[in-house]
Image: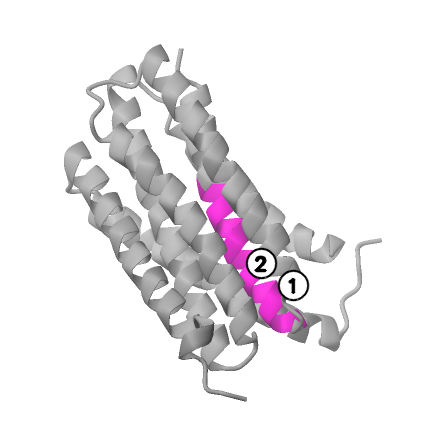
Amino acid sequence: MRRRLNLLAPLVFALGFLAISQQGCDKDKLRALATANDRVAATISIAIDLKRELGQQHLISPSDELALTNALLDVNRAFVVINGRAKTYTKLGPAEKIEIVALLNDVSKAVQELNSQGVLHIRDEQAKARFSAAVQGIDIAVQAVIVLVQGVK
Amino acid sequence: MGAQFTADDVIKFVPIIEMLAKLGLQFLQNEQTRGGMTTDEVFARAGVTLDANTAKLLDDLTRLSPAAQPPG
């Protein structure tokens, strides 16, 4: 497990750096939020495709795939709310920050559920490792949104 | 001394590396196409992807529901 974390560390660092580097001028913050949202949506999409692939290869059981589907639906649903609100903003200021941070709590909880109710139940070690990497990707993308929004003053 | 990896260890990591490569490729493709978009268009694209995700997941729920499973 420690070695696996060692492999993921450079990716975490690189995406973290990207998130921090997005915090430029105020006028760019809304653009950065849109970009970060787009990345979250793309990582969820990758996880869905992988889940389907693992199911088709019978590396996960239908009941495991059903659990992952429900957990991914919760993550996606929570992020639909964030993106829906964010696209109505004309700026990313303190008021918007409070709203997005509150909504991000729901996303973080849903990602934790995806790990505890979904990933940990996968019996096949290879399938678990692959899906865990995909969930890690979602988590990193969500963390990038959190870093960005918390940088708003 | 650093950690020593056996051939078995490396084989175990191949699917993870494959997954990370896929994520990286998708990331780069997104970065390239997003360059010429306005902020509204980027929000809209995220919305389209999220809606497509919802549709795929609802399809999967229907396919995986107990009623859709073959008996036995």
In the picture, residue A29 is in which quadrant?
top left
Q: Which residue is mark 1?
A: A121
Q: In the rendering, at what x and y percent does residue A66 appear?
A: 49, 66
Answer left or right for A139 relative to A152. right
- Asked if the magenta segment contains residue A53, the reply would be no
Q: Secondary structure at mark 1?
A: helix
Q: Amino acid at mark 2?
A: Gly
Q: Residue at x 19, y 33 (%)?
A: B39
Q: Which residue is mark 2?
A: A118
Q: Amino acid at mark 1?
A: His
Give the magenta part as a residue range: A125-141
| Marks 2 and 1 in Cβ contact (< 8 Å) | yes
Q: Secondary structure at mark 2?
A: helix
Between B19 and A123, the residue placed more toward the observer is A123
**Quadrant where the image shows the N terminus of chain A:** bottom right
Q: Residue at x 37, y 29 (%)?
A: A22
Whole-angstrom CA distance, mark 2 to mark 1, is: 6 Å
Looking at the image, residue B53 lies above or below residue A14: below
Q: In the rendering, at what x and y percent does residue A44 appear?
A: 40, 53
Looking at the image, residue A95 lies above or below residue B61: above
Q: Residues within 10 Å of mark 2 (few under 14, many from 20)?
A: many
Q: On what subunit does the disc labeled 1 rest?
A: A
In the picture, residue A12 is in which quadrant?
top right
Answer left or right for B53 relative to A56. left
Answer left or right for B26 relative to A4. left
Q: In the rendering, at what x and y percent does residue B33 appear?
A: 21, 50
